[in-house]
Amino acid sequence: MHITEKDFGKNYHLITIENEAGFHLSVTDLGARIVSLGREMELILGFDSAEEYLAKDAFIGASIGRTAGRIEAGRFTLEGQSYQVMTDPLNGHSLHGGQPGFETKKWDYTIEDGEKEASIIFTTVSPDGEHGFPGNLNVEVRYTLTQENVWRLTTKGVSDQTTLFNPTNHVYFNLTGDVTQSIDNHQLWVNSADFAPLRQDSIPTGEKATLAGTPFDFQTPKNLASVFTSDFEQKNQFNGIDHPFFLKENDLNTPAAKLVSPDGTVEVVVSTDASSVVIFTANFGDNAPEMRGKKLADHGGITFETQIAPGAEQYPAFGSIKLAANEPFETTTEFKINLKEANKHGN
C-alpha cells in the first residue's frame, strides 16, 4: 500500500492510500471526510481544497454527528430529563447535531499501513454541552482501503454521560465520473421492503410504509430515472429521494444496496451493520455547486448514509440512538467497488 500526505489548504491535510491495482482513497482531517475514490475515474463528489468545502458545502463526504438527520424542534428526553439542542433557523429542527458539527472539526489522525490494507484513523472529542448534547463524547472514524478495492468505514464512540449518538458518512457517488451528468441512468438495488415517509419539513411521520407498488421500491434493480419521472407524492416533496430505508438484514456479509454505472463497468456494493440507510439523490436543482471545474447537475450524486433511521429518538420502532454512559459504540459499513473493462465492441 502506498500512502502520501499533502497540504489541503487552511492547515488541513489530504492523505491518500493507493493499493497495488492503482485504486485510491483520499481523505482529509477537515471533517474526517472522504475526498476522492477511484482508479482512473473519480467515483464520488468532492472539492479540490478545504476552502471549497467550507465555502460551498461542508457536508459532502464528511463524517456526520452527533446525530445524523433531524431531531424535531431539537427536543428529546433522556432518563427523565428534557434537552433542547441547537436548531436550524430555516426549519426549527436540529440538523446533523448542530453546526458547526463534526463536518468542520479539525480531527487528529494516525496512519496504519499493512500489506493487505491500510487505514487512516481520525479522532475527536465533542465536549459536554456542545450544541446542547450531554456528555463528553470521544469519537473515532477509521477509513480503510484493501487490496480488493474495499473501502471500509468504522465509527466508534464512548461518552461519560448517557447521550444520543447516531453518526454517518455523507459520501455521494456518481459512477459516470462526470458531475454534469445526473444519476438517472444508474441502476439501483436496495435490500429494503419498508421506508419512512416524511412530512414536508423532512421530519418522519413515524410510520414504516411498504415500498411495494411505489417508485421507491428497489427490491428489483431499476434505473433511478423511474423515480425522477414519477408523480409519487414523497418524491414530489423533495424533488427526489431523501428518505430512510429500513434494511431487511444488517450484517456485513449481506449486501444492503448495489449501484451500477450506466455502462455497467462500475458496481458499488454496500454492506453494513446499521439498521437503515438514508438515500439522498442530491436534489439540489439549480443550486448545485461548481465542483472540480464543472457545475454539478441536479441529481448529480447519490448517498448511502448508513445509520439508525432519523426520528428514532421519538419513534422506538425505528431503533434506539441512546448511548449509555461509558458504553462503547461501534458501527461498520463497507463499500466494495467492482471495476469491469468496457466492452468496446458493443456486444
Image: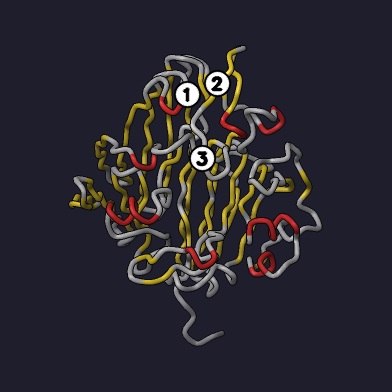
Give the amino acid at mark 3.
Asp
Reading the image, the residue beneath label 1 is 133
Q: Are marks 3 and 1 in contact (CB under 8 Å)?
A: no
Relative height, residue 196 to residue 132 (above, below): below
Q: Which residue: 49% across, 40% down?
A: 168
Give the amino acid at mark 1.
Phe
Given residues 129 and 90, the one toward you in this image is 90
Instruction: Determine the image quadrant of residue 140.
Output: top left
**CA neighbours of label 3 inside 10 A, class few (<14), some (14 to 19), many (20+):** some
Mark sitting earlier along the chain (3/1): 3
Reading the image, the residue beneath label 3 is 88
Reading the image, the residue beneath label 2 is 83
Report x, y in % for residue 267: 51, 62
Relative height, residue 203 to residue 124 (above, below): below
**CA neighbours of label 2 inside 10 A, class few (<14), some (14 to 19), many (20+):** few
Given residues 220 and 210, the one toward you in this image is 210
Given residues 345 and 288, the one toward you in this image is 288
Mark pair 3, 1: CA separation? 15 Å
Relative height, residue 55 to residue 64 (above, below): below
Report x, y in % for residue 5: 19, 50
